[in-house]
Image: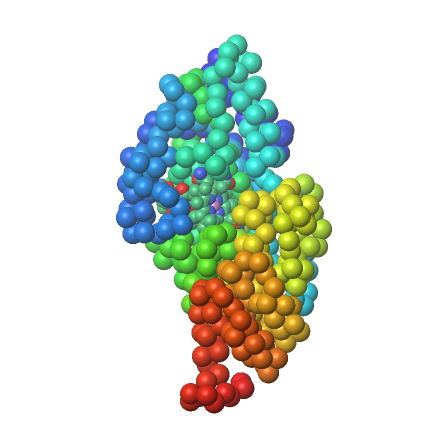
Amino acid sequence: MSEAIKQLAVRTALELGAGAVRITSARADEESRRRMQAAFARRDFLCWSYDDEYARRATDPGDLCNGARSVVCIALPYATAAPRAGPLRGRVSNYAWSADYHRKLRALLDAVARTIDEAAGKRVTTVACDTRPLAERALAARAGLGWIGKHTNLISPGLGSFVFLGEVVTTLELPSDEPLAKSCGSCARCVEACPTQALRGDYTIDANRCISDLTQRTGAIPVSMRPLIGDWVWGCDLCQLVCPPTREAGPLGGAQWAPLDLEAGRPGLVELLRLRSSSFKKRFERTAMGWRGAAVLRRNAAVALGNALDRAAVGPLAESLCGDPHPMVRGHAAWALGRIGSPPALAALRGRSNVERSDEVRAEISMALQPFLTSPGVCSIR
Ligand code: B12
Ligand code: SF4
Ligand code: SF4
């Protein structure tokens, strides 16, 4: 009976677009708990309120569902071809350029859960995907869905790492699959490709240095990290784009994961810098870029414009420095103007320094002007 329910669940998930499905026991996982606690003790995830208690809960599926015995782990491939780059355009990670994946994955998980419940004749399931305290990658690895790579993402054989993970936790005892005996071996391409050195090469990450984390946090981006962000305005895919099994798998995601339009995958940076809450809702509510608000995206656009080193961006950045309602955005616009340099950029910075009221922004303006001061009162243009 339990083998029949397992096959039914697997078939349902595959028919609905899953790339792979495996099952593991719902027992608590001591090794993952230790690894997570060690990561939190190293302070690798400062922007996330993770602690020992979170690690305990996340590695015990029984915490999500009383009496849990098995977890159905699902990988949903989403890679699609990237839209073409253009001047003054930013870059959005593949996972966020179509309609929000949470809804699509959730619909798939609900359908699998319904199938199991109907076969059992009662409610025996709970679903999880991304937002619940569950160590999804560790569970998926234990189920044999793939292995955790040095970029810390789960790599599924034949699918690569551009897969979302979701789980159906059940009180039924379903036959478990075995973990794979696989690792990255001597490969270190992701470690070498990471522009911020967030990856240590020992299967751990300093998430505080990860561009994905930097572009999603709500506070200021540390000055030393800004030049390393390049043109990314949401997330980052560099470590996965160079990953051999992911490259070999290719774009398996299909039309539903293609960018909604060019703007969704390669947004115009000047337009993004001018984004206000009303148009933000219209443009981004449907995507995974919609949860942090418009000011975070304007801040990211300012950083990417600074990194573009294109004088065409000076006018829009000066406008943002003088008129953006959010001090964080004005501060990052000041940084970008200083990075680009040029007489109009310096004039905008000096002009604003006389009237700016926010201490935070005034500090950014002074910092931006600093390299141009050769001696007190003398200014050199680079
Ligand atoms: C917080 C978070 C982030 C943070 C922190 C990232 C991180 N590496 O943890 C930030 C914002 C940086 C982020 C970025 C991304 N994320 Co994210 N994120 C999460 C979230 C919500 C929690 C992760 C977490 O708890 N981290 C804390 C660390 C300590 O735990 P962990 O990574 O889960 O597990 C570690 C331990 O379990 C340990 N471990 C345990 N057992 C074993 C055994 C062995 C042998 C080894 C080696 C290690 C090991 O190693 C694991 C990896 O370090 C999960 C959803 C979820 N609930 O799991 C999604 C999730 C991990 N993210 C996902 C995605 C898609 C991304 C991005 C690719 C998005 C993007 N393109 O920008 C990037 C990838 C960046 C990267 N290189 O990791 C997917 C990953 C899918 C996959 N194939 O692995 C998830 C699972 C969401 C989902 N449901 O699909 N994310
Ligand atoms: S997502 Fe980007 S910044 Fe983060 S670890 Fe991968 S390459 Fe580095
Ligand atoms: S690039 Fe190489 S080392 Fe990094 S995750 Fe992929 S296979 Fe592993």
Q: Relative to 34, is 213 above or below?
A: below
Q: Nearer the viewer, residue 312 or 375?
A: 375
Foreground residue among 161 and 336? 336
Q: Position of residue 295 (x, y in %)?
A: 56, 54
- In this picture, is 204 found above or below 76? below
Quadrant in which residue 19 is drawn: top right
Give the answer, above or below, for where 85 lies relative to 251.
Answer: below
Give residue 103's position: percent from left, percent from top.
60, 34
Q: Is residue 146 left or right of residue 35?
A: right
The answer, for residue 197, to whether it is visible in the render is yes
Measured as percent of width and height from the top left, residue 168 is found at: 49, 27
Q: Nearer the viewer, residue 148 or 37?
A: 37
Q: Depth check: 98 or 154 in front?
A: 98
Q: Position of residue 221 (x, y in %)?
A: 46, 60
Residue lying farthest top? 121
Q: Please tell me which residue is depicted at 61% across the width and 64% down the height of the picture.
A: 323
Task: Write the residue at 64% across / 56% down.
Answer: 275
Q: Does 248 sit left or right of 28 as displayed?
A: right
Q: How many marks on residues?
A: 0
With 185 as the anchor, is 239 left or right in this view? right
Task: Name the image colouring.
Answer: rainbow
Q: Is residue 183 above or below residue 337?
A: above
- The image quarter in which residue 281 lies: top right
**Residue at horizontal 63%, vertical 76%?**
311
Residue extending farthest right: 261
In this orientation, does residue 155 appear?
A: no
